[in-house]
Image (spheres, rainbow, N blue to C red):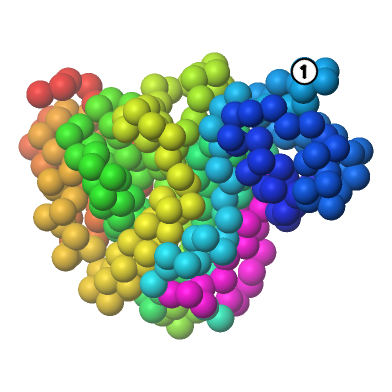
Amino acid sequence: MDKKFNSHLCQIVTILSDGEFHDGTTMGDALQMTRSAVWKTIKKLIAYDIPITSIKGKGYTMTVPLILLDPQKIKMELDNKKLPITLFESIGSTNDYLKLKKKAKGPEICLAEQQTQGKGRLARKWHSPFGQNIYLSCLYLFQKDISELAGLSLVVGLAVINVLKSYGVSDQLFVKWPNDILFGQKKLAGNLIEIQAESYGESQAIIGIGLNVNMRNEELKEINQAWVALSHILNCYVDRNELSARLINRLFQYLHHFNEFGFAPFHEEWLKADSLTGETITIKNVRESLSGRVVDINAQGHLVLRLANGILRSFSSGDATILKKS
Ligand code: BTN
């Protein structure tokens, strides 16, 4: 069941985040809640896998740092203060929520603390534990035909890279066509674009971004590929409110530019961050699996391969695996 945000949850997390013990009665008095309502909220946090210790006579304490998402804090930092933001405590998928908006009038954002059906490209699952990462979807209307949107996921990747650089991360940060953000060989973020509707040269796109921010190591077993979180790279806890605001601002700048000028102005920026150019790869899509050397990204954002027989082929979609590291 989708759950909109419960303000008591946020208030209790704020109290417990000082690392001290707090008893139910004192917290209840401070928040004008009954002791049993406090207990219910604590039980909910435990169900969300937030490590909370309780000691009889002392109360409760939280043993990990946690700052929950707060749309007000995010909005304060946005270039567009009127941008609608909906935050869910828990939802199936933020992309699926925005897909319900048929014929939207303008852009909007959906964020969630947890996704129970988070999805990645090629029907993969996107692991989305509560309160740790960013699960963000953006609905955006393009004055473009669907055929002109092949470069969109690349542009979104570049916007994410740009934000990560603003945190001082630059070495070893790569984009991997078409949608991965890697730190070294490990996945840090990905995006999932779903084009929802199109008519008369307009397209409504849902742009989903998953960014590993404060993901804890115990989540290791749930993910079947090498991953890394921003907090591991920076060696500190990262406030997701500030990060979300930076991401939304940068994303809209990149999307407006792409809407107006297409992928061509981003070509150079892509090549600088790209991990595949010059590599020998295998590309798989629903129709075929082919190997070749990556020579470029074309003006549409398609991957250009030189096959073994010397022929150049471009691909608008697919999954790329490096065969031989150059
Ligand atoms: C990938 O790398 O395969 C894409 C991952 C995209 C995950 C994000 S999280 C927010 C949005 N909602 C989803 O269900 N998926 C995207």
- Name the spot of residue 283 as percent of width and height, x first: 30, 34
Q: Is residue 128 visible?
A: no
**Which residue is disc 1 drawn over?**
55
Q: Secondary structure at mark 1?
A: strand
Q: Magenta region: which residues? A: 80-104
- Name the spot of residue 162 as percent of width and height, x first: 26, 52
Hey, which quadrant is residue 246 in on the image? bottom left
Query: Within 8 Å: ligand 1 and the Cβ of disc 1?
Result: no
Location of the C terminus (image quadrant) = top left
**Residue 123 to residue 155: above or below:** above
- Name the spot of residue 26 as percent of width and height, x first: 80, 39
* Image-based side of 269 in relation to 252, left or right: left
Q: How many marks?
A: 1
Residue situated in front as seen by the camera: 250 or 233: 233
Which residue is at a point 42% across and 68% down the rendered structure image? 78
Which residue is at a point 45% across and 83% down the rendered structure image? 200
